[in-house]
Amino acid sequence: MIRAGELASRAGVNPETIRYYERRGLLGDPERTLGGHRTYDENAVTLLRVIKAAQGLGFTLDEIEELIDAGTHAHRRRPRLAERAKAKLGEVESKVQALEQIAGTLREVIASDCDDLEQCALEDNCPIPFAGIAGVGDGETPDRARAGATTT
């Protein structure tokens, strides 16, 4: 049996993380020594490492809890890991696409060598999509949208 501090060290987590996972039900209630110290078995190290690895793949604690629960209760019909991983991959790919668009716009901003954000917003060739952000309609320029936004 190992104590909480050693468990935290071996699993690469903070001791507070262990308490939090216990409160959430991800980690079972520990046994206690006569002195009241929490003790765990080797399975707790593995479980904590699995949870951290799943978080590293983008799974939320709620999703991880479902996956752990599904594995321990075979009679319950819950999404399998492969199904969850496929859904998570779709989310990640969407985020990657959005980040690639952001990176492309930032490259354009760097290439345009703009000095002033407000001045750039008034330029027709400004690479930052101010028109989309401001809700500019077709045929409306950023300066007209800005003027319309300031008059109430």
Image (cartoon, rainbow, N blue to C red):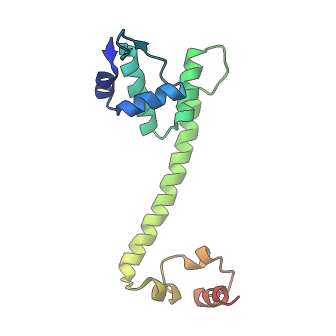
Name the residue located 59 percent from the left edge and 74 percent from the top edge. 133
**Image coordinates for residue 56, horizontal then vertical, percent:** 42, 38
Res 5 quadrant in image? top left
Q: Residue furthest top?
A: 34
Name the residue located 57 percent from the left edge and 21 percent from the top edge. 69
Relative horizontal placement of residue 1, taking residue 70 as reference (left or right)? left
**Image coordinates for residue 41, horizontal then vertical, percent:** 37, 13
Residue 36 appears anywhere in the view: yes
Relative horizontal placement of residue 89, taking residue 32 as reference (left or right)? right
Residue 81 appears anywhere in the view: no
Eyeballing the image, is 60 above or below 31?
Answer: below
Name the quadrant of the C terminus: bottom right
Eyeballing the image, is 70 above or below 148?
Answer: above
Name the residue located 56 percent from the left edge and 15 percent from the top edge. 72
Q: Residue furthest front?
A: 35
Relative horizontal placement of residue 137, taking residue 7 as reference (left or right)? right
Residue closest to the eye, 11 or 35 = 35
Name the quadrant of the N terminus: top left
**Image coordinates for residue 110, horizontal then vertical, percent:** 36, 76
